[in-house]
């Protein structure tokens, strides 16, 4: 079905306190990247609609098996994403995303599990502190929330639609990183491509759901437009992450034709994926992947 594009990567280092460069579109690989995080030895890619084999409204790099696309084409698209990230498909972990707040951890204390692709049940966040697994979460307007612990060498990702954002999924991911040994002053947060406030009017029920949990949210969540990235950035800062370590600028999925958008395209469309991980994956046939355990409960 065509050659897999070569892995995108980077080299060099970013000094403490320097601001992140932000999301950069790589036209050769047809993905968005975070070069600064890649230079620190992380795998970070956001796929687009481009570079896959799906057809029709799913064209062409749909990664979701749950939207009506041909499963064989989706599997090929997933294989291509793994190739771009430089990992074998057996290292990729997907999740059954339910707009909740559960975070699962893949860490060195987990027992070995059979190799092969895994799907975590009812999970909207994954934290990784070993090099043998790379979680992928899927999006078509919701916010990808990425967390990196510089010294502890942890990376995590969460899926934040309005329900997950209001429910505190970002805080659960931060707490999971803290529970895994990360210090607050080493945490960085990056928010990925997602719908912007100009394209996201919401009902009064959404406004009130945020206000009930977070009274300060009214400056971000209004009926004429919900700024989920703005809300999440302030939530991270209020949790103690340094503002200089919070990246909230990202493309709007509804405005950028390279990206899938449920709000723009309707229910029959695809999903892009954000893959994160630690560089240095082992890929031998004898390798075994870790099991997953939940480490974050309600913290508010």
Image (cartoon, rainbow, N blue to C red):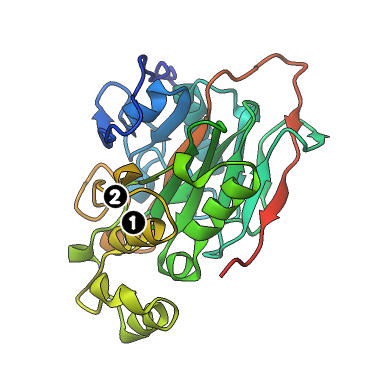
Q: Position of residue 144 (x, y in %)?
A: 41, 50
Mark 2 packing: few (<14 Cα in 10 Å), some, or many (20+)? many
Answer yes or no: is residue 201 visible: no
Label 1 CA crowd tier, 10 Å (few <14, some 14–19, many 20+): many
Where does the image place residue 111, in percent across and percent down from the top left? 82, 36
Residue situated in front as seen by the camera: 185 or 217: 185
Labels 1 & 2 near each other (Cβ < 8 A): yes
In this figure, which residue is indicated by the disc labeled 1?
233
Mark 1 vs mark 2, CA separation in Å: 6 Å
Residue 151 percent across, percent down from the top left: 52, 31
- Give the image quarter of residue 189: top left
- Looking at the picture, does residue 173 appear above or below residue 43? below
User: Residue 147 appears at what percent x and percent y?
Assistant: 47, 44
Rendered position, 164 above or below 66: below
Foreground residue among 186 and 88: 186
**SS label for mark 1:** helix
Mark 1 or 2 closer to N-term?
1
Q: Is residue 293 above or below residue 14?
A: below
**Residue corresponding to mark 2:** 248
* Residue in view at x 61 percent, y 56 percent: 123
* Element on which disc 2 rests: loop
In this orientation, which residue lies closer to the viewer: 226 or 137? 226
Q: Residue at x 22, y 46 (%)?
A: 257
């Amino acid at each position: 079905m065509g050659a897999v594009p070569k892995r995108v990567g980077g080299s060099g280092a970013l000094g403490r306190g320097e601001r992140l460069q932000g999301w950069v579109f790589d036209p050769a690989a047809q993905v968005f990247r975070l070069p600064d995080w890649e230079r620190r030895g992380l795998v970070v890619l956001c796929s687009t609609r481009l570079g896959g084999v799906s057809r029709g409204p799913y064209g062409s790099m749909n990664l979701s098996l749950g939207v009506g696309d041909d499963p064989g084409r989706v599997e090929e698209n997933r294989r291509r994403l793994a190739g771009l990230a430089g990992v074998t498909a057996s290292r990729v972990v997907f999740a059954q995303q339910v707009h909740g707040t559960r975070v699962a951890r893949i860490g060195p204390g987990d027992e070995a599990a059979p190799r092969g692709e895994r799907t975590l049940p009812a999970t909207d966040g994954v934290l990784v502190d070993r090099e043998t697994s790379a979680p992928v979460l899927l999006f078509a307007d919701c916010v990808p929330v990425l967390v990196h612990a510089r010294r502890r060498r942890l990376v995590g990702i969460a899926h934040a639609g309005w329900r997950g954002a209001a429910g505190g999924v970002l805080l659960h991911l931060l707490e999971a990183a803290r529970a895994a040994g990360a210090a607050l002053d080493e945490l960085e947060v990056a928010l990925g491509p997602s719908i912007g406030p100009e394209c996201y009017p919401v009902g009064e029920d959404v406004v009130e759901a945020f206000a009930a949990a977070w009274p300060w949210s009214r400056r971000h969540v209004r009926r004429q437009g919900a700024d989920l990235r703005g809300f999440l950035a302030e939530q991270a800062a209020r949790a103690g992450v340094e503002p200089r370590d919070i990246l909230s600028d990202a493309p709007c999925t509804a405005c950028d034709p390279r990206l899938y958008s449920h709000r723009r395209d309707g229910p029959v469309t695809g999903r892009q994926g954000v893959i994160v991980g630690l560089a240095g994956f082992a890929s031998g046939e004898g390798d075994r992947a870790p099991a997953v355990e939940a480490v974050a409960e309600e913290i508010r």
